Image (cartoon, coloured by chain):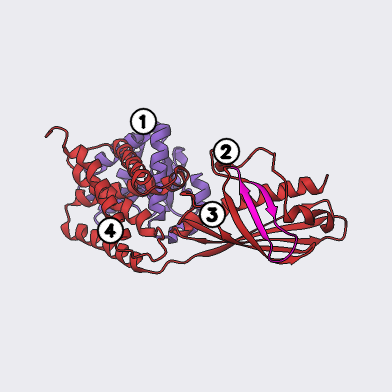
Chain colours: A purple, B red
């Protein structure tokens, strides 16, 4: 469903608030089918907000966006897809580790997608976000 | 009493009272001349409700799952109040509910971000923007007309089909469309006062409601067009949609088969169109197909 909407109904992005409302629909669905996933996202949010100069906002296409100052570290959609931008080298290394995939839309970019499937994935999600955070911090 | 009126309870009560007041005020001031229900009422008000609720819940440290759950309860209360005070039909409320739930949850999470940042300038800007959009949308003219067209192939000649197009006996096939199954009236029978231009036609629905029609084009074996002159005063459709015209076109394929085209024109009074027209098209299409499939069965006997 998520993949179908992202690929086939991308025009919804041009309708103000439609992407946010769609993500809210996902939140409701997640609450009904796997409510603990919303708790995992909360846990990630809590951890990332303890890092220096990090703030959060709603992502323009729905979900929570993590920023280092003004720059985006990554964002997590309410179905548990964590998207982070790395350089191509880091992306290759992470793909070799076997836990992340090409971004669910921009496959040839530096973006990666990590799917939160269980509570254990929180640790790896935090590791990925920390890597992107440190990269931004060191280059600031 | 003091224990009952706590921030958690206020997060349910205040947004709903505010929403009902705004909708009442909008109706009282009669800003929409045709009584249309507009984008602002289905999008801006739920967003605002979500933001208000979070203002009361901001110190409760709610988890996201609780926030979504509470927002769904808020949406449920809003729908119940719409049923009681606005006289909306149950099916209408089912149709509108995804929009209400989604935007209340969206408002709640916008509010969560707003109040977390404690940035008064940002908060005033967001609320001012919502207010401006609400006022601008409320005083704008809203018109939307659309036509839905469907076609099927029937293994019969136009001559064999025509009599079944003008009027037909009761449809006995069970309803397949989910909205018909849960109680939305489906077309059952059509009667006609005469087989000529200007004659009266009645489309009778499963709950006994009747659409009065007048034939405005009677081109035998080719074109039957009728205007809807009176539609039932049903809360499910009243003030939401006007079916204005219907048409059946028959095209002889020259091989013993005929293409039957069903067209319907309607005027929507509920907005945003990108949401409600999906429903209007789906319902109209299923009305067409139920009637046209019945005509096919009768004609191929």
Q: Quadrant of the C terminus of chain B?
A: top right
Disc 2 marks which residue?
A: B181
Q: Could you tell which of marks 4 and 2 lies nearer the N-terminus? A: 4
Give residue B25's mark: 4
The reply to whether residue B70 is visible in this rendering is yes
For numbered disc 3, what is the local secondary structure?
helix
On whether disc 4 and disc 2 are found on a single subunit, the reply is: yes
Q: Report the front residue among A57 and A103.
A: A57
Measure the C-alpha gap from mark 4 to mark 1.
48 Å
Name which of mark 3 and mark 2 comes first in the sequence: 2
Place of residue B49 in the rendered image (x, y in percent of width and height, measured from the top left):
28, 49
Question: Do the residues at discs 3 and 1 belong to one chain?
Answer: no
Give the magenta part as a residue range: B188-206
Q: Earlier in the sequence, mark 4 or mark 3?
A: 4
Nearer the observer, A28 or B82: B82
Residue A86 visible from this viewpoint: no
Q: Are marks 4 and 3 on the same chain?
A: yes
Label 4's element? helix
Rendering coords of residue B142 (x, y %): 43, 66
Residue B200 in magenta stretch: yes
Residue B89 placement (x, y as % from top left)? 44, 45
Mark 2–mark 1 Cα distance, whole angstroms, equals 41 Å
Which residue is pictured at 16% across the width and 57% down the height?
Answer: B120
For disc 3, the marked residue is B280
Q: Residues within 10 Å of mark 2 (few under 14, many from 20)?
A: few
User: Do circles 3 and 2 both sit on a common chain?
Assistant: yes
């Amino acid at each position: 469903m998520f993949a179908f909407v992202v690929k086939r109904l991308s025009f919804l992005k041009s309708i103000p608030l439609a992407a946010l409302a769609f993500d809210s629909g996902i939140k409701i669905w997640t609450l009904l089918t796997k409510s603990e996933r919303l708790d995992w996202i909360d846990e990630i949010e809590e951890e990332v907000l303890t890092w220096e100069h990090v703030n959060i906002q709603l992502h323009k296409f729905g979900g929570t966006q993590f920023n280092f100052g003004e720059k985006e570290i990554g964002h997590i959609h309410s179905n548990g897809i964590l998207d982070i931008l790395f350089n191509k080298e880091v992306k290759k290394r992470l793909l070799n580790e076997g836990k992340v995939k090409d971004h669910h839309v921009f496959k040839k970019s530096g973006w990666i997608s990590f799917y939160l499937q269980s509570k254990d994935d929180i640790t790896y999600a935090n590791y990925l976000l920390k890597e992107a955070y440190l990269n931004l911090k060191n280059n600031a | 009493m003091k224990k009952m009126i706590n921030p958690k309870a206020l997060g349910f009560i205040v947004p709903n009272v505010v929403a009902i007041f705004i909708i009442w005020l909008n109706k009282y001031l009669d800003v929409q001349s045709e009584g249309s229900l507009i984008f602002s009422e289905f999008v801006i008000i739920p967003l605002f409700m979500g933001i208000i609720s979070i203002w009361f819940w901001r110190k409760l440290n709610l988890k996201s799952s609780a926030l979504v759950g509470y927002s769904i309860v808020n949406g449920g209360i809003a729908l119940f109040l719409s049923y009681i005070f606005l006289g909306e039909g149950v099916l209408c409320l089912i149709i509108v509910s995804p929009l209400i739930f989604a935007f209340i949850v969206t408002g709640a999470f916008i509010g969560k971000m707003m109040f977390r940042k404690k940035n008064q300038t940002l908060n005033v800007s967001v609320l001012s923007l919502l207010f401006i959009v609400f006022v601008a949308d409320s005083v704008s003219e809203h018109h939307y007309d659309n036509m839905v067209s469907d076609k099927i192939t029937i293994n019969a000649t136009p001559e064999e089909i025509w009599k079944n197009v003008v009027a037909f006996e009761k449809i006995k096939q069970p309803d397949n469309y989910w909205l018909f199954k849960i109680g939305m009236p489906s077309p059952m029978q059509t009667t006609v006062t005469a087989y000529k231009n200007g004659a009266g036609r009645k489309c009778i629905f499963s709950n006994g409601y009747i659409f009065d029609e007048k034939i405005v084009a009677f081109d035998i074996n080719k074109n039957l067009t009728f205007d809807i002159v009176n539609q039932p005063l049903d809360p499910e459709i009243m003030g939401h949609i006007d079916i204005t015209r219907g048409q059946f076109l028959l095209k002889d394929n020259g091989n013993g088969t005929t293409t039957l085209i069903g067209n319907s024109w309607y005027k929507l009074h509920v907005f945003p169109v990108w949401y409600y027209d999906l429903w209007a098209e789906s319902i109209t299409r299923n009305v067409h197909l139920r009637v046209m499939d019945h005509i096919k069965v009768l004609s191929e006997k």
